[in-house]
Structure formats: C-alpha cells, structure tokens
Image: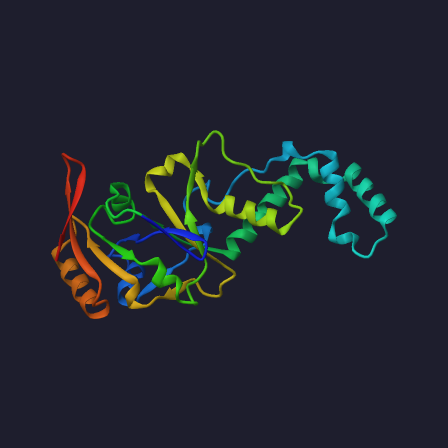
Amino acid sequence: MEITFENIILPKIIYKYRDWNIPEHQRILTHNEIYFSSPRGFKNEYECNLPKDYDSVTQDMLYKYFYQSSLNEGKTEKEKDEIASEMVKNSPFHLKSHRVCVEQLFKETLYSRLSIFCVSEHNNNLELWNKFGANQTGFCVGINPIQMFKSSDTFGSGGKVHYYPIKTPPKIRPFCFSECEKIEDMLKVIYNLPDSLKEENEYRLTKTDIEKRAFTIPSKCFEELILGSKISERNKIEIVSIVKTNLPNCLVYQAYYDINKKTFTFEKE
C-alpha cells in the first residue's frame, strides 16, 4: 500500500536493512539516526549516471541555447544573434574531450549536492537481507514516512526507483532551456537504475545542499524492528534491550527463513 504526502508517493512503511556489527549502523536504534549518503559512495557505476542524448541536438537548438545564454545578458538582439551564430560554428560542443569534461563536472556537482537515503517497501527481501542485513545476521527497521516527513529537519523529497534495460538506458538532455527541464532530468538521474538491480524494489528519500547528512528522527517514526533469521543471541538481546528503552512503541519481530519454500515468516517477540 502506498501513501501520498506532499506529492511524494511512498509505502506506508519503509524498511532499512542494517548490520549490527557496524557501529554506524547501530545509531539508527541507539540515536534514532538516519544517514543520507552521497552517491559518490555507492559501489555502482550506473548510480546517478545516465547518458546524455547528444544525437537529439540540432543546430537550431544550439543557436537557441547560445542566444539565451547568461553571457548575452544586456546585449542587443543583433549582438545576441551574432554571438549565437558564431558560437554554433565554433562551439566545442561536438568535441569528445569537451563532453567528457562537462559530464565529469555535472557528476561532481551532483555528488557534492545530493544526499540519498535508500529504503525498500519489503521486509522479506532475501537479497536485501543478505546484501545489507549481513547475510540475515543483522536487523531491519520499519519506519513510518509520514511521521518522519512531518519533521522539518528531515523533510526532502522521495519516490520509487524505476528500472530500465541495461542496454537501453533513458537519456537526459545535454543542456536545458528551463528550470522545469532541469528538474525533470535531475529526477530521472536520481530515480533510474538498471534492471539488474530490480530485485531490490528500492525507494529513495533525497535532500540537497545539506551541511550534515545524519538526522535524528522522533521515536514515533519507528514502527517495526525485525531481527535477522541468523542473528546471534548476544546481538538479539542487546538490540531488544535498546529498542525497549529508546523505542517503546516499536514492535519487535523475529524473522525465520524457510530455505525450501524460500519464504520468510515473522513472530512477535
């Protein structure tokens, strides 16, 4: 079931898989802390990295782009026309070296400004349990996004990731003529990944231009805590104790995985 809040569509509960043996991961329970990561740290070459559609650019589009350029502010119509016409003839736009440089600058700017909190709509995703939940020895936290977004400190944007065939990725404009086009392309870059990752069924919460990437959210945001099917007894006792103290309204479940049926069941602790 999805919910809509301030034009943002998210599941009723979003899930984050964590490894209790990593101190930074513990903070989501010990400090009510969620962390927005820079795409720079994601180990995926396709992350926030869509190709530009250079083939769609015509001479008329180049002329319009250079005519509207901020460099032409204060110029007469004739001067704008002369500058744009000259730039179309001599622009480095078609040079591969220029394109590589511009794309690298775009990527670096995006990585420095954008922060992402990756979550799932499922608490029974085997791939996520193994990949991010320490092979089912970790834990999974269920968060209520409406409660979280009511906090001004954590408000941003969010949505579902779309998965494309890896050989035919969507493309973005080499340059934009309006803020609306810029936003459309930015969202396309953020919320598209190759279909080799589709099993993750990912949703994303995003923020831009933030001084710090870690945010404390209210205890009432935490709906569920699920213990991995292979969690150690020591870690289980420690986690349950912390949840009862810090998150008294958060329900705790133990996960069990049936390797034959390839299904999860959950029992309330």
Figure check: 170 above or below 233? above
Q: Position of residue 246 (x, y in %)?
A: 23, 69
Query: In the figure, residue 89 lies in which quadrant?
Result: top right
- The structure residue drawn at horizontal position 65% and vertical position 36%, both measured from the top left corner, is 96
Q: Is 207 drawn above or below residue 170 in the view shown? A: below
Q: Nearer the viewer, residue 227 or 234?
A: 227
Q: Which one is in front, 196 or 22?
A: 196
Q: Residue at 75%, 36% (x, y): give it.
A: 60
Image quadrant for the C terminus? bottom left
Apparent side of residue 81 relative to residue 172 in the rendered image (left or right): right
Q: Is residue 105 left or right of residue 70?
A: left
Q: Residue furthest bottom?
A: 245
Residue 202 point in image, percent of width and height: 36, 45
Q: Residue furthest right?
A: 78
Tell me residue 182's x, y (percent). Answer: 59, 48
Question: Compared to 204, does 244 lie above or below?
Answer: below
Q: Quadrant of residue 139?
A: bottom left
Q: How is the image coloured?
A: rainbow
Which residue is pictured at 51% across the width and 44% down the height? 188
